[in-house]
Image (tube, grey):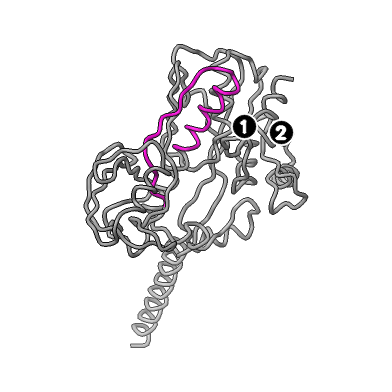
Amino acid sequence: MKKNKHKKSRKFKWLLSLALVFISIIALIYPTSYYVEMPGTTEPLGKMVQVAGKKDEHKGDFFLTTVQIARANLATMIYSHFNSFTTIYSEQQMTGGLNNKQFNLVNQYYMQTAQNTAIYQAFKQANKPYTISYKGVYVLQISKNSTFKNKLQLADTITAVDGQNFKSSAEMIDYVSKQKVGDTVTIEYTRIDGSKHKSTGKYIKIANGKTGIGISLVDHTEVVTDPKVEINAGAIGGPSAGMMFTLEIYSQLTGKDLRSGREIAGTGTIEEDGTIGQIGGVDKKVATASKEGAEVFLVPDSGTKKNSTNNYLEAKAAAQKLNTKMKIIPVKTIQDALDYLEK
């Protein structure tokens, strides 16, 4: 009888141990409400960018750099405490309150805008002709009282209001502001995937007291060029590859050898006036570029002397931690980047 009890006791302890292991595994892999950001990939731009009729045969490559973002679990949260190139963010910090679909749409918008501005800057720097075509207005935010809140999506492009087309967002806003609150309005819009839609709602009174449809907006323009430029970045989103897209397009367009055989990575937005803007996760991008063997890393320099507001200082600190031989080059404008590469 005692022997049987002993067996039952051992079996109970074994099952308890198994249950604890199972619970521990679930706790480690079950996603939390937090996000983890870590070094992503270093991608060659020669495979993404194609200027029609041009071929870049110079040695070396330009690379964009990415960060990897995923839902954090207990295991990654523990790992982040032992890896200085991994950061945990709250859901609010990472997405700004957007759901996954909205967050992805906004990042697609930023990527599309970065590519368009890169084409504009490359042709401008190369003194090549281009024209700017107005496509409508991007929807960047939809108010809670908008009658289109369940119809429009972020990054949609409104192309017509009440059957009327406009040459600028100012024209559209002027027309809408003269309409009567409560009247019916029909808008036509294009999704970021190219599909076209039409919806009907009501004019509302917006925050400034005027008539509107309840969206925040920005002009959707497209740079039209000859030769044509095609960029295929796959699933990569966000604005931070703007500078590197510009350099790759400019290199193909002019035929100049900017790399001199070097592997050149970098990050930074490209603005309409040619300035290079700050980005997030620069330390992770330095880490992935160094790992992939880049010799030069171009990075935005805000001119401030605080790491928290200057990507260049952040990148230098990251390079010191990694003990990398990769050169960290500060740039404030696209002209700075071209000057460095050409000299």
Q: Pointer 1: residues within 10 angstroms few (<14), some, or many (20+)? A: many
Front-most of 55 and 198? 198
Image: 80 above or below 162? below
Please name which of the two marks, 1 or 2, marks the residue nearer to the observer: 1
Looking at this view, name the residue that lies furthest to the front.
178
How far across and how far down the image is residue 316, in percent? 74, 43
Of the numbered discs 1 and 2, the one sitting upstream in the chain is 1
Q: Pointer 2: residues within 10 angstroms few (<14), some, or many (20+)? A: many
List the residue tagged with mark 2.
326
Residue 242 inside the magenta-drawn segment: no
Residue at screen point 56% across, 35% down: 272
Front-most of 122 and 215? 215
Q: Which secondary structure, mark 2?
A: loop
Instruction: Indicate the quadrant containing the N terminus: top left, top right, bottom left or bottom right.
Output: bottom left
Check residue 83 in the rendering and tell me which mark sits there, or answer none. none
Image: 217 above or below 295? below
Residue at screen point 44% across, 33% down: 233
Q: Which residues are magenta?
A: 112-140
Q: Which secondary structure, mark 1?
A: strand
Q: Is residue 215 left or right of residue 54?
A: left
Q: Is residue 2 left or right of residue 75?
A: left
Looking at this view, name the residue that lies furthest to the bottom.
1
Residue 124 inside the magenta-drawn segment: yes
Instruction: Indicate the quadrant containing the C terminus: top left, top right, bottom left or bottom right.
Output: top right
Front-most of 74 and 305? 305
Front-most of 295 and 196? 196
How far across and how far down the image is residue 101, in percent? 36, 52
- Please report contact status of discs 1 and 2: CB closer than 8 Å, yes or no: yes
Q: Which quadrant of the view contains residue 189?
A: top left
Dot 2 amino acid type? Met
How far across and how far down the image is residue 127, in percent? 58, 18
List the residue tagged with mark 1.
265
